[in-house]
Image (tube, helix red, strand yellow):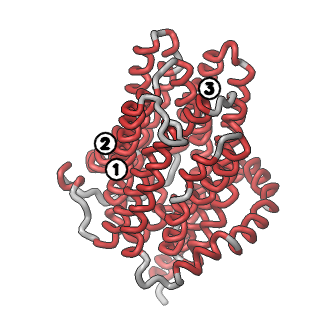
Amino acid sequence: MSKSFMAKRANTRQLKKNVKQLKEKTKRIAILEGSAWAVMAGSGVYAITPYAVALGASNFVIGLISAFSTISSSIGDYLGSWFLQFSKSRKTQLFWSMLVQAFLWIPIGFLFLFSPGISGVSLLILYSLSSFLGSFGGSAWLSLIGDSVDEKERGTYFGKRNKVLGIVQLITSLAAGLLLNVLTKNVFIGFITIFAASFVFRAISAYLLNQYWEPLFKKQRVSLLKTIEFPKDPYFRNFIILSAGLIFATNVGSPFMSVYMLKDLRFDYLSFSIATIASVVSTLITNPYWGKVIDKYGTRPVLFATSSLIVLIPFLWILSTDLLGVVLTQLYSGFVWAGFNLSIVNFLFRVAPHDKIPAYAAHTNGISDISTFLGASVGSLMVLFLNGAPLFFMSTLQVTFFVSGILRLLFVAYALPNLSKNMAVRGDRFLLRVVTVYPIKGMQMELMSLHDTFTSLIGLPKKLRR
């Protein structure tokens, strides 16, 4: 062999080694960055509904806050995907949208200085703008992280990452609830502290996002209308019908679950925090389990099983009238939604051509946000129409839960058969194993590994410096 050939071969090996190191570094940074985001989610996002209640906002306005924040998020998904062709880099678009989002938490924290009417509308506008900015960089983030996480490890990696983020979000939510509970007589001081933490950690998240590895990315010059145009892939269309339908049905009732706990069940902030983090605990424990199941059996069986189980959640909420009942319902909900959300991410990476990941992500996120907006709007109109009047044995908010459950059942019955055709495993048998054998084994392993997880959290910065 010639010296030039040997040198070229050595350079190729070195290049592959460097790329591998950059990928590994980005995956570690992504866990740190996600943890900073989780602090914002566990403090600021967690506190939005309690804050609206403390400001004196009506149930109708609280429903609109959920509805309009999601429709603005949908607009951000599509505009963000389209705007990528004009950005200097994906990281640039991510950094500035996240940084501006961080600064929005400052005015949100001082809305209590105004009257309930002004503060409620202002919260709706500011939080909707925050949601828009968060989604504006969503497609860029998925594209970036997709360059660093190989297909064969996506289920395991995202399961591990979600587990770490869940731990951070859990601790933050519990701390926020304890703070509000201690400052009951001066609760707005607690809210200011919470939103200040959201500002700081979102800014840290923006900085860490800027440290991702970014290989060359082929930009596609397309019009905004072309970006909005839906892919012709029939399998992707069936998936969207199922996921969007479930999200629509869920959001008919879900914006009012926090209100239900705070107003109807009269939970204090500590009880509210315990109930809220119960789903986070369940999610962080079961995320790695779902990742391994997806890697072993595929995305469609998990999508089949979790979609079927999601139908039961609103009916469990109707039966939950005390803290224990709500906590058990939240544990079940966290377990099921963890698998569903992870299967959505894996499905997206599996069916989308590499250069079209931002477009497919925009459609998935955008349509989900539109479905959330429509669902929350329907729920808000129901609350306004019923005007607090009970129906049979159910309160107004319980009626929205009941309607949510019926709608979930209808969408699953319609869309699921189209996605479960020719699966490698039988859906009914897999569903039975998912709710019996697999969770017991998976939870045993995850509970035993919690010590290792906390140890790895402490060691992350050291790895990052290598």
Secondary structure beneath label 2: helix
First in sequence: mark 1 vs mark 3: 3
Circle 3 residue = 194
- Which type of secondary structure does the marked residue at label 3 adopt? helix
* Most foreground residue, 297 or 412: 412
Q: Which residue has dot 2 on it? A: 75
Q: Residues within 10 Å of mark 3 (few under 14, many from 20)?
A: many
Q: Is residue 202 visible from the viewing direction of this image?
A: yes
Looking at the image, is mark 3 or mark 2 earlier in the sequence?
Answer: 2
Q: Decide: marks 3, 2 in contact (CB < 8 A)? A: no
Labels in figure, total: 3
- Residue at (62% x, 26% y) in the render: 194
Amino acid at pointer 3: Ile
Image coords of residue 178 (percent x, y)? 73, 29
- Seen at 17% across and 51% down, the residue is 225
Point out which mark residue 366 bears.
1
Of labels 2 and 1, earlier in sequence is 2
**Nearest the eye: 276 or 152:** 276
